[in-house]
Image (cartoon, coloured by chain):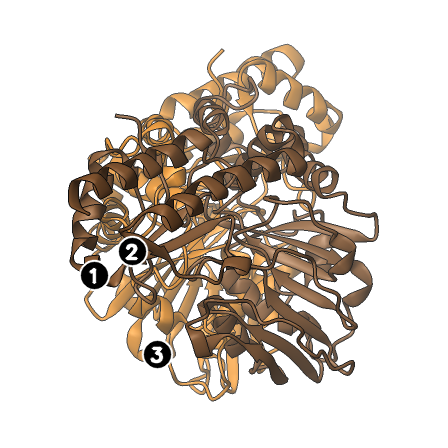
Chain colours: A brown, B orange
């Protein structure tokens, strides 16, 4: 049975990327050596590393004064690396959920943190609007997509101060204006690769402004100066990023994939809104294209475990909601197809017929 | 042509582990889903994570009061995480090469650092002996194997203070007494897995003694409390560790592999010492079993590039020495076979016949 993988991360990657990954594990680029056993100082790995960076630059139209680096670990590590590198006096954060809160907690170790807005009053079911942003901040931090609550910023906001964004779960899922941001980071394991590597896109002039001494591995400038080869990089993870971005380019880049993501999300939200059994949890205008969160209507609450089972029997896996929201979450990252989404909506329809 | 991969890291992994890795990339544990797309919150990944930890414990006979954790990134990150967690007032370091120096540099950001001994006077060609260790240190840090210079501690030293060791390149290559150490860490990409993950083995009682606030991701206690699932782990890298350690167990564990490593190193050092063209660079008693460093005898110096070419033509790759030592380095980690070593010694012999 074909599996439809709705996991929130690590999550579905494009089949072509996976197949090329398996081949490279056996024999990388015709060298007769596994990519897992390939030195990062070879010309073959240089091509992978530069290929991944250049695809990032091309797909997001990143200007020359921004640098793209890949670092071992995930976004959680960046929660402290960002303030380490950027927070001298005061930073502003917008609290849109668990991941934003974690980022806020780490930043407080490095300076004053002002939480400018929060949607905690309604269990993070919306994105705060019209937030007043003071001009004396070192930076403003936002989480553009909130995997647990299924909310997303649908536009690149205007900020009078350096804008920093955790885009772990919506990077390269939609067109964006990178010049509105000073730094964008994220873990790879949603839209662009396997777990174990983070990307940082940074406008170089914002670095080197803090007075604290920085450990070498935490100082972004060292990774920039060494083109992400300051230490041994996570070779295979970067290879998978390159493969995934090549696939993305073949899908028409971010414009092409965005069109498909809109279509996929519409299909699923329409079914949630139509179906007697289910209801969405996020405010309609802030609904995420990436993580679709829904619950049983109160009168059908007891059917929830049965629906999880039913979906799994039909090949739809990973749709259990995060414990903080309950219900269901279908993560619909780039590599998910409309066919995958339809497998789920068909389940919802037939389940309704059976039990409503 | 079969390749004999002498790269210093990332380096040769066991063929069985590589083949199982490629299979898991296509379909993990019969789930129909790639391991690259598998959630770290599944029971299948739990088995991988616990399997890798338990194999570590079994193979090194690690007592209950030590914890084993896996962290994204490599050993370089631990150069600052170690003093972050352990250095309150003063630490002692022994300087045995580039990696030790890097560790020393990071530690200085956190407290007083006393370099108790150094072999820099002879380009790190030996391990300092009979080092006097003050008893007022928070810890003593050593690098047990020095990849660039081909030197290695062949015994677990006695230390009156907590002993911390970077064992990136000799972990699980020989029997060791873990109870002589308070903390052992390293990158996986030499003997136990691909790049992108580090291991930390720590006696739990030494943690929580520093007064500085620790960022969550840097505090080892968070990773211990969450069994290395505090954040999304590098799933595939941990899977490869488990596969590699299972292979190691089938080789007779560390006792079995040590016997083979001794045999391999003897074969290669004997040829270096016998051959008119070559000479070893490290003091004989401190010669590494893992990284065998050698150069051309001065009168044959100009043959060096030709030998590199000649070796590559015979399938021996990755033997160029580090630029700080020059000449050649054959890394002979666990997964290299005696056959691989003999391919190189045969090259050395036939090259000698041709050119000496």
Q: Which residue is mark 1?
A: A299
Q: Are marks 2 and 1 on the same chain?
A: no
SS at badge 1: helix
Image x and y of residue A9, in percent: 42, 49
Q: Which mark is residue B206?
A: 3
Q: Is residue B78 shown to the viewer in this render?
A: yes
- Give the quarter of the image for residue A26: top left
Dots 2, 3 in contact, CB < 8 A: no
Q: Chain of mark 3?
A: B
Q: Nearer the viewer, mark 2 or mark 1?
A: 1
Residue B70: percent from left, percent from top: 37, 56
Residue at 39% x, 50% y is A273
Crowding at mark 1 (Cα within 10 Å: few <14, some 14-19, many 20+): few
Q: Which residue is mark 2?
A: B176
User: Which is more N-terminal, label 3 or label 2?
Assistant: 2
Q: Position of residue A280 (x, y in %)?
A: 39, 57
Marks 1, 3 in one chain:
no
Disc 2 versus disc 3: distance between alpha carbons? 20 Å
């Amino acid at each position: 049975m074909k599996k439809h993988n709705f996991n929130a991360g690590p999550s579905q990657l494009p089949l072509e990327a996976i197949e090329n990954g398996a081949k490279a594990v056996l024999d990388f680029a015709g060298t007769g050596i596994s990519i897992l056993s390939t030195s990062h100082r070879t010309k073959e790995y240089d091509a992978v590393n530069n290929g991944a960076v250049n695809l990032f630059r091309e797909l997001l139209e990143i200007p020359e004064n921004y640098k793209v680096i890949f670092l071992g670990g995930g976004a959680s590590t960046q929660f402290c690396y960002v303030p380490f590198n950027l927070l001298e006096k005061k930073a502003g954060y917008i609290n849109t959920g668990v991941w934003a809160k974690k980022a806020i907690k780490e930043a407080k170790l490095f300076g004053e943190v002002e939480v400018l807005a929060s949607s905690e009053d309604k269990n993070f079911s919306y994105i705060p609007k019209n937030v007043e942003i003071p001009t004396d901040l070192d930076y403003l931090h936002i989480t553009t997509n909130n995997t647990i609550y299924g909310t997303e910023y649908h536009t690149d906001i205007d900020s009078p101060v350096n804008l920093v964004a955790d885009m772990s779960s919506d990077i390269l899922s939609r067109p964006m204006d990178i010049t509105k941001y000073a730094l964008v980071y994220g873990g790879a394991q949603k839209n662009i690769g396997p777990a174990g590597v983070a990307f940082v896109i940074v406008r170089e002039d914002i670095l080197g402004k803090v007075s604290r001494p920085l450990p070498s591995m935490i100082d972004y400038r060292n990774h920039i100066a060494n083109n992400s080869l300051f230490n041994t990089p996570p070779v295979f993870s970067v290879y998978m990023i390159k493969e995934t971005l090549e696939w993305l380019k073949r899908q028409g880049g971010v414009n092409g994939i965005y069109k498909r993501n809109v279509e996929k999300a519409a299909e699923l939200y329409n079914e949630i809104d139509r179906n007697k059994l289910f209801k969405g949890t996020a405010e309609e205008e802030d609904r995420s294209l990436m993580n679709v969160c829904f619950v049983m209507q109160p009168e059908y609450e007891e059917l929830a475990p049965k629906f999880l089972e039913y979906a799994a029997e039909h090949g739809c896996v990973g749709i259990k909601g995060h414990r903080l929201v309950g219900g269901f979450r279908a993560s619909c990252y780039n590599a998910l197809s409309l066919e995958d989404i339809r497998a789920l909506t068909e389940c919802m329809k037939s389940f309704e017929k059976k039990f409503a």
